[in-house]
Amino acid sequence: MSSALVLGADGGIGRQVVAQLAASGCGTVVTADRRGPVDHLVDVADDGATSRYSRWLDGFEQGGAMPDLVVWSVGVYPRRPPHAYGTDATRAVVDANLTGFLRFVAALTRVQRRDGRPRRLVVIGSQAGATGGTDAVYAASKAGLNAVVKSLAREYASLRLIANCVSPGPTDTPMADVMGERRAHYERAIPLGRFSSASEVAAVVVWLLTQAPEAVLGTVIDVDGGLVRR
Ligand SMILES: NC(=O)c1ccc[n+]([C@@H]2O[C@H](COP(=O)([O-])OP(=O)(O)OC[C@H]3O[C@@H](n4cnc5c(N)ncnc54)[C@H](OP(=O)(O)O)[C@@H]3O)[C@@H](O)[C@H]2O)c1
C-alpha cells in the first residue's frame, strides 16, 4: 500500500490533495505546512529546512514507511509589480517558492539514490511560469520549478523517480483572494469562463501519482480552463 507526503497540506489545493489521496485508498498521508493541523510544521524558506527534511525522511525509512508519493504544494503569491519588491522581499518569495523546493529535493534525491524505490513526485507550479504575470518574482520562481522538475525527470527516472509538474491557472483558494477586483478580468480571459476549483487541480495531481503511465514524465500539465493552451 502506498504512503504519501504532502507539503503545503493546509493550503486550498493541498487540503484537496490530502482528501483525494485518502479517498483513493492511499495507506498513510503525512502532512506538512508552516501552520495548521498538520503532522509536521516547517517553514520551507528557512535555512534549517534541509536538515529537518533529512530527519523526517530518515525517520520514515527507519519506520519502514518511506513515502512513495510526494506532493509539493507550497507557495506564496504577493502579486506585487517588480518595482514594489526590495531585496529582502524578493529573497523571501524566491526562498518560499523555489529555494525551499530545492532544499527538499536535496534530501529526497539522497533517499532516491539510496533506496532506488519507485516513487512519484508532483510539484504545483503556475501558469505564470509559462506566460509571465503581474508579479515577475513569482513568475520567475515558478518557471524555476518547471526547470527543477525537468532536471529531476532527466537525471532520476533511471533511479525510478517519476517527477511532473501541475500548473494551475487562477484557482479558487485563499491565494486567489489577492486578485480582488481583477478577478472578473481573469474570468473573461479564461475560455471556460471561470476559475478552476482546488478539487480539479487535485484530481490531476492524484491521477499523476496513482494512475498515470510512468511515461508521463517531466511534463508540465496545465489545469487552467484553457488559459495557456501551450
Ligand atoms: N490559487 C491559485 O490561483 C494558484 C494559481 C497558480 C498556482 N498556484 C500554486 O498552487 C500551490 C498551492 O496554492 P493554493 O492555491 O492552495 O494556495 P494556499 O491556500 O495559499 O496554499 C499554499 C500553502 O503553502 C504554505 N506556505 C507558504 N509559504 C510557506 C513556507 N515558507 N513554508 C511552509 N509553507 C508555506 C501556505 O501557508 P500560509 O497559509 O501560512 O501562507 C499554504 O498553506 C502554490 O504553489 C501556488 O503557487 C495557485
Image (cartoon, grey):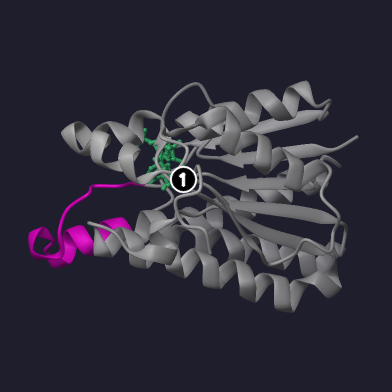
Residue located 35% across and 29% down the image: 174
The answer to whether 156 is drawn above or below residue 84 in the figure is below
Q: Is residue 84 magenta?
A: yes
Residues in magenta, as a range = 76-93
Residue at the (52%, 58%) spot, across then down: 229
Can residue 46 be seen?
Answer: no
Outermost residue, left direction?
Answer: 83
Q: Nearer the viewer, residue 41 or 127?
A: 127
Q: Nearer the viewer, residue 146 or 48?
A: 146
- Look at the image and tell me whether residue 26 can be seen: yes
CB of residue at label 1: within 8 Å of ligand 1? yes
Q: Residue 26 in the image: x percent, y percent?
A: 81, 30
Task: Measuring from the top left, give residue 205's x and y in whole percent.
Answer: 66, 43
Amino acid type indicated by mark 1: Val
Q: Nearer the viewer, residue 181 or 80?
A: 181
Q: Residue furthest right?
A: 1
Residue at horizontal 17 percent and vertical 62 percent from the top: 88
Density class for disc 1 (Cα within 10 Å; few <14, some 14-19, many ≥20) is many
- Residue 64 lies, in percent from the top left, at 86, 42
Mark 1 falls on what kind of element?
A: loop
Q: Quadrant of the N terminus?
A: top right
| Coordinates of residue 126 in the picture (x, y in percent) | 45, 54
Please give left or right for residue 135 compared with residue 112 in the image. left
What residue does disc 1 label? Answer: 74
Q: Quadrant of ligand 1?
A: top left
